[in-house]
Amino acid sequence: MTTTTVTKRHGLRRLENYLPPEGVPIAFDIAGLGARFGAQFLDILITFGSVLALVWFLAWLDLLGWSAFVTLFVLLIFFVRIPYYVLAELVWNGRTLGKRMVRIRVISADGTRLTPYQVTARNLMKEVEVFTPITLLFGAANFQWPVTIAIFIWTFGTLFVPLFNKRRQRLGDMVAGTLVVDQPKAVLMPDLTEAATGTAKSARFDFDPSHLGIYGRYELQVLEQILREPPKTPEARTRITEVVKTILAKIDYPEHVAHAEEWDFLLEFYRQQREYLESRHLFGDSRENKFHSRGPGDGSTKNPGGQTPRT
Amino acid sequence: MTVAANTIAEDDAIRSARFRKEREDGWKRLDTLVTTAEKRGVQGMSYEDTLALASLYRQAMNSLSVARAISMDRALLRYLEALCARAYLVVYAPQESVTGVLGRLFTHGIPQAARRSGTALFIGFLAMMLGAFTGYMLYLQDPAWFFTFVPGGLADGRTPSASTEYLRRTLFDTSTRSSEALGLFASYLFSHNTQVAILTFALGIFVTLPSFILTYYNGLILGAFFAMFAQAGLGYELLGWLSIHGVTELSAICVACAGGAQMGLAVLLPGNQTRRAALRDRGRDAVKLMILAGLMLIVAAVVEGFLRQLVQSTELRLVIGWGLGLMWLAWLLLSGRDGPRS
């Protein structure tokens, strides 16, 4: 049983409603195919590269007899095909060396911990999906053309499996019930309401409910995005002026805002708007966007352009 | 900021900002703990840190839940979501020790899986036997079939035109391989056979058929070989030569085929489940069968590489080969009857 849903935004797939045992849904970004391909390529490069380096080093030392040498080589090549991936993902919790480098990892699709079985299953299938096709492709010139075509169909067939499902699972992921996601990055930004210069009593700008009742959560968060990137170029400053003008017109604010005060105005407006919206929300009056007054039917439609232009 | 200014700001801050201020230190602590755990694993952390990690993780989850209800600060929500996801991945990491996993696998997991997979095992052995039968009958009709079935490298001069004397020598030959070369041979065999077995297994996901065909093909080779030696009057000797490792090795291929069949059957006949769910359920047994096959192949390679050349009497070869087979059977049938279903 899975409760997860996948939403697509700006080309990124996000796995939502992933339910850990604590019962608070969390979200992951599903790893892009480029990252996965890169990780696989890096893994092959690392494993086969280190085997070759080791073999070259041993040959240089010339300590082992010929047959012991070849025995070692055969066993090493075997080891770096399936066992390496299984062990690495077990020890490093769903990450091989290549996956560590491109910052992706394997998780269990159902919210439980990753089991040794899942790791083994998804990597056993790698033999069909990765290694055999590659080996065959290298030898493709020696086969007759129907065999070559069959090999190409097989290779590309398995390669395209992740393209045809929402969660970007390859065959091994389906068998094992696993997903590959981006390693989450947590960056704690300062709270913008702390950055507002004034306190409630000494605020330079004062907004009353008629000013704050216009916008909703969506516009507030667009404003947050603008405020997170202070303007550095003259063009960016002009855009800020435009934003201020738009807001002033929309909320019908009586005062004039001087050019030097614009940034403070926005910060103060953000603080009071957020306080207002959050307390309305606590009283059961959630305002998703500026269309909230038109009733619940319209309230859900988002206006991507927004009254406040994006920077 | 002075203390006085701080108090004013605290009293004055809006509700969600106060909420954040109260919990921020815990989140930051969790962040550093998670970072160390990601780099060095939980094993390297102190007892206090591990305890703190678990409780801070629950607090952060709680914060996330509350923040979703009261805060409209998107950056904060993003941060908490990512922090909780990272902490979740650290707290719910696989915690089984490798030896514990292996122990349970051998005493309970594999035998139970084998006993549950009757149909699939039947398919695996059936494929091999049908192949052998077909190969045998076709060879009797026309020995030229031999060249169709058996790749040149495998035949190694053992063709229908070879003399009985030559064939006998291939069965009882000690001169060509020194003991050192035997080790090489064993490792090569293991690697090669395992590759075949993994392929047989993994291809099973395409509705069983490829696994069946691969195993059937192995049977064909076997049948043709047997027919050739039988016509030369060496059937009994070949049986000994094959049995010593073949009972284990050929069974391993059949078991790998059975593992593939388990998955193929899940795709073909999912029953009341969705195909994906069926695949996930039966995949568990299939993977265990595959591990069993790998184990059998290791044993077979050791026997084939060393014992076959060292043991030259056909009777002894038969006893060792089928004795090994009985041991596998006893293990799979008798072990793990008591404990919990894994």
Image (tube, coloured by chain):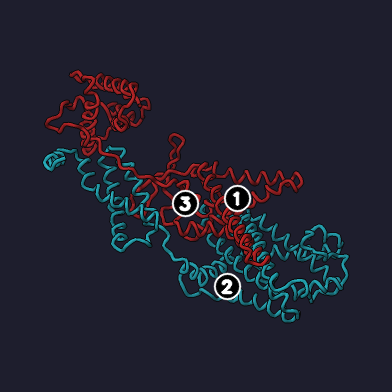
Chain colours: A red, B cyan
What chain letter is assigned to the residue under label 3? A
Residue A119 percent location from the top left of the image:
50, 57
Q: Residues within 10 Å of mark 3 (few under 14, many from 20)?
A: many
Q: Nearer the viewer, residue A292 or B291?
A: B291
Residue position for label 3:
A106
| Residue mark closest to the camera, 1 vs 2 | 1
Q: Left or right? Give the position of B289 relative to B312.
A: left
Asked if both marks, 1 and 2, belong to the same chain, the answer given is no
The nearer-to-camera label among 2 and 3 is: 3
Whichever of labels 1 and 3 marks the residue nearer the N terminus, that label is 3
Q: Which residue is mark 1?
A: A130
A257 w.r.t. A160: above or below: above
Which amino acid is tagged 2? Answer: Leu
Res A114 → quadrant: bottom left
- Give amino acid for label 3: Val
The residue that appears at 54% across and 48% down in the rendered structure is A42
Residue B259 visible in the picture: no
Residue in the picture at 46% in, 50% down: A100
Asked whether the viewer can see residue A116, the reply is yes
Image quarter where the N terminus of chain B lies is top left
Determine which residue is flagged by label 2. B332
Question: Crowding at label 2, few (<14), some or many (≥20) Cα neighbours within 10 Å?
Answer: many
Question: x%, y% of residue B258?
Answer: 62, 62
Mark 1–mark 2 distance (CA, rounded to whole Å): 32 Å
What amino acid is found at the position of numbered circle 1 in the picture? Val
Q: Judging from the image, what secondary structure is the residue with disc 3 in? A: strand
